[in-house]
C-alpha cells in the first residue's frame, strides 16, 4: 500500500531552475548595462529592477516541530535539508501564493475532519505536499487531494469505478487519510513516521528501520522523495502560517472562497447529468465542479445506493441556460 506521488522532486527542480534562470537574466542585464552607453527607457527600468531585486537567506524559525514532535535542527544535516525546503517554497512565489489562496478555500473542510478523528492539525499541510490541494492524478495512479491509490481507497471503503470515484470526494478522502494515519501512528508511535509512511508506505518505512537498525525518521536514510517529504510539510506549515513574514502580500478579497452548497439525495440512476443540472438551475460544469467524484455524464446506480450531491446556493454563479 503506497500513497505516492512523484512531484516532490519536480517541484524542487522547477523552483531551482526558475531561480537559476532569474540569476542568468540578472547577469545578462548587468553585462548589457556596462557594454552599452546609450539606454532606452526600457533598459533603464530593467537596470533599476536589477538593482532593487534581492534574494535573501532565510533564518530558520526556533522550536520547529511537526505535530508537536521537535525537528532536530541542531543537527547540521537536518538544518540543511530544512533550509532547502524553506528556500524552494518561499522563492517559488507564484506557487506559494496559489497555495495560500487554495488553503483559504479548503482548510475549513479538512480541519474539522482531522480534529474529529484525533489527527493533529499539521496534517492539513500533508495534503498540500501531496497535491497542492488539487484533484490531480499521479503517474502511479494516486488520485485526488489526498493522492490515494485505488487498492487503498477500496480497502478503506471508497467506491472506485469508471462511474464513481470517491477519491475525488474531499470529505470522504480526508476520512480515509485519517484512518490510515491513525493506524500508522499506532504502528510507529510517532506522527512524523506516520507522515513519512503516507509517502513511502508503512511496509517501506518498517523495512528501512530494520535494515538500518534505527527507528526515528530523522535518523533514516530514505529515497529522495520520502527524505524530503516531512521537511517540505514543515516548511509549508511555517510559510502558510506566516505568509506575510515570507513576502506574500494579499487581502481577504484575493482569497479563493468555498461556495456554500446544499445536499440533495439521489437514489436512482441519472441518465443525463446535463439535463439533470438544468432542472436544478445550474449547468453540467457547475455540477461537476462541486461533485468531482461523478466521473461520467450519467450515474448507473444499479444497486440503488443513496448518493448525496452538492448543489451550490443561488447567487454565486452567473448562468444563462440558453447560452
Image (cartoon, rainbow, N blue to C red):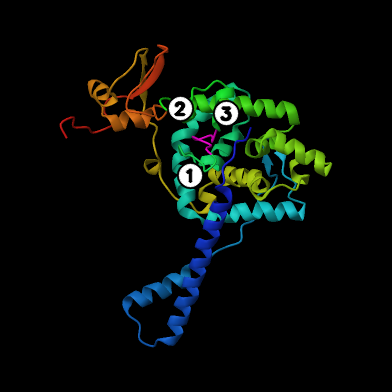
Badge nearest the viewer, 2 or 1 = 2
- Please check the rendered image and state whether residue 262 is part of the magenta-colored stretch, yes or no: no
> What residue did someone put label 1 on?
99
Pointer 2: residues within 10 angstroms few (<14), some, or many (20+)?
many
Give residue 287's position: percent from left, percent from top. Answer: 32, 28
Cα gap from disc 3 to disc 2, whole angstroms:
12 Å
**Label 1: which secondary element:** helix
Q: Which residues are magenta?
A: 141-148
Give residue 35's position: percent from left, percent from top. Answer: 44, 87
Q: How many marks?
A: 3
> What residue did someone put label 3 on?
151
Q: Of label 2 and label 1, which has the lower sequence position? A: 1
> What residue did someone put label 2 on?
165
- 106 on left or right of 214: left
Pointer 3: residues within 10 angstroms few (<14), some, or many (20+)?
few
Give residue 277's position: percent from left, percent from top. Answer: 27, 24
Q: Of label 3 and label 2, which has the lower sequence position? A: 3
Cα gap from disc 1 to disc 3, whole angstroms:
29 Å
Which residue occupies 47% across, 50% down?
95
Amino acid at each position: 500500500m503506497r500513497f505516492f506521488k512523484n512531484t516532490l522532486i519536480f517541484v524542487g527542480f522547477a523552483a531551482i531552475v526558475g531561480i537559476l534562470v532569474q540569476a542568468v537574466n540578472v547577469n545578462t542585464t548587468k553585462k548589457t548595462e556596462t557594454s552599452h552607453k546609450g539606454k532606452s527607457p526600457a533598459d533603464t527600468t530593467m537596470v533599476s529592477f536589477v538593482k532593487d531585486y534581492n534574494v535573501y537567506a532565510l533564518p530558520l524559525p526556533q522550536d520547529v516541530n511537526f505535530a508537536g514532535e521537535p525537528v532536530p535542527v541542531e543537527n547540521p544535516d537536518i538544518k540543511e535539508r530544512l533550509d532547502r525546503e524553506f528556500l524552494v517554497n518561499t522563492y517559488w512565489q507564484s506557487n506559494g501564493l496559489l497555495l495560500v489562496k487554495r488553503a483559504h478555500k479548503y482548510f475549513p473542510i479538512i480541519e474539522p475532519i482531522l480534529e474529529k478523528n484525533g489527527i493533529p492539525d499539521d496534517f492539513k499541510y500533508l495534503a498540500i505536499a501531496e497535491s497542492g490541494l488539487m484533484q490531480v492524478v499521479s503517474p502511479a495512479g494516486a488520485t485526488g487531494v489526498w493522492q490515494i491509490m485505488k487498492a487503498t481507497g477500496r480497502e478503506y471503503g471508497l467506491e472506485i469505478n469508471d462511474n464513481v470515484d470517491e477519491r475525488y470526494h474531499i470529505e470522504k478522502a480526508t476520512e480515509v487519510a485519517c484512518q490510515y494515519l491513525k493506524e500508522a501512528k499506532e504502528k510507529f508511535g510517532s506522527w512524523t513516521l506516520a507522515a513519512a509512511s503516507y509517502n513511502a508506505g508503512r511496509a517501506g518505512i518498517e523495512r528501512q528501520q530494520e535494515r538500518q537498525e534505527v527507528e526515528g525518521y530523522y535518523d533514516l536514510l530514505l529515497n529522495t522523495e520520502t527524505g524530503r517529504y516531512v521537511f517540505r510539510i514543515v516548511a509549508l506549515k511555517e510559510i502558510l502560517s506566516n505568509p506575510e513574514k515570507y513576502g506574500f502580500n494579499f487581502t481577504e478579497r484575493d482569497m479563493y472562497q468555498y461556495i456554500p452548497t446544499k445536499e440533495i439525495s439521489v437514489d436512482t440512476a441519472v441518465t443525463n447529468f446535463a439535463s439533470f443540472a438544468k432542472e436544478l438551475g445550474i449547468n453540467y460544469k457547475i455540477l461537476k465542479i462541486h461533485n468531482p467524484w461523478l466521473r461520467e455524464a450519467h450515474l448507473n446506480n444499479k444497486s440503488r445506493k443513496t448518493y448525496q450531491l452538492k448543489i451550490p446556493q443561488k447567487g454565486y454563479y452567473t448562468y444563462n441556460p440558453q447560452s
